[in-house]
Image: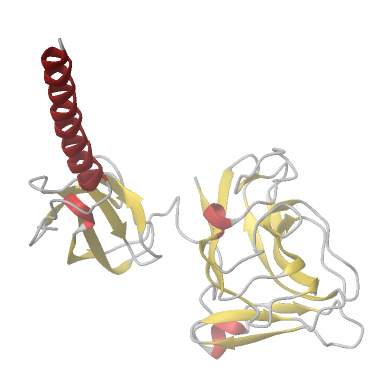
Amino acid sequence: MNLNINLKKNVFLMFALALGILTSCDDEVGNGNGLTATNVDAAFTITPVAGAVNTYLLTAQTKGVIGSKWNTGDGAYSGKMNETINLPDAGTYTITHTAIGAGGATGTASQQIVVATTDPLKGNLVQGGSFETAADQAKWTVLNLSANGSAFWSYANKSATIHSPGGWAQEGIYQAIDVIKDKEYTIDMLVSSPSGSDETWFEVYAGTSAPASGVEYKDNKVMGLSTWDGCAKDAFSGKLSTVGCVKNDKTGTVSNVVKFAQSGKIYLLIRSGGNTFTKDGITVTKIELRGK
């Protein structure tokens, strides 16, 4: 009888040990500590999409690849291995694919796309949105909102940065843009700061009323950052449509889509400030307003 009990115990221990070994192996692969791919091939092809203006299909080779990240010039993002992109503005674009293999190994590959003409329906209506030259910067008008001028915008490295000493000091910039009645548009831009803030906002408006010096602009808030709503508390970098958390006045949701009741002039305005503002400022570039 004791022999049978001991035999059963030994069988159980051997089974448990084997199961533990298998589980350990599975965990290691799942956590990237087991089998790790080498020489991950990030090769991809670019194919124009028939019937679609300035639209391209990026197709990654799939052997040994379990995930893809793409960068069309605005920062890397997680995408599909068959990714469709739209490049509405004329120019030369470098497309970079980061292929992810087993164990978290990666490989990268890049190709260029030359876009000959701007899409007449989706071209960027913003002028000087990258602040590259003095002429670009002159397209923007400063809206003075702080009585002592302590908050201010500076231009460098193809971007604009809002600085504030805190204490609710704020400042704005804007430009007038002509739009068409009932047409849908999208607004976006790249925003970044290497440090977070407290009691801080960065808001984007598209209103029909003209901005006035010393008067806080509040006409048709579209999107933005707000520490009260949970973003910009820590360092951030990316498209405002992705990293922002401010709700659109018209939709009541986080959305960068706008539509206007009349054709004519609207004012694209950025207003930012706060009580405990990031010491590094908030930087913006590649501002765009496009037809959908």
- Position of residue 283 measured from the top left corner of the image (x, y, whole percent): 59, 76
Residue at horizontal 72 percent and vertical 78 percent from the top: 141
Query: 291 or 188, which lies in front?
Result: 188
133 lies left or right of 137? left
- Is 57 placed above or below 23 here? below
- Position of residue 253 measured from the top left corner of the image (x, y, whole percent): 67, 40
On the rendered image, what quadrant is the N terminus found in?
top left
128 lies left or right of 101? right
143 lies left or right of 232? right
Query: 171 or 10, which lies in front?
Result: 10
Quarter of the view holding residue 33 = bottom left
Regarding residue 82, the answer to whether it shows in the image is no
- Position of residue 140 measured from the top left corner of the image (x, y, whole percent): 66, 77
- Is 34 placed above or below 174 here? above
Quarter of the view holding residue 26 = top left
Residue at horizontal 27 percent and vertical 44 percent from the top: 80
- Position of residue 25 measured from the top left corner of the image (x, y, whole percent): 17, 42
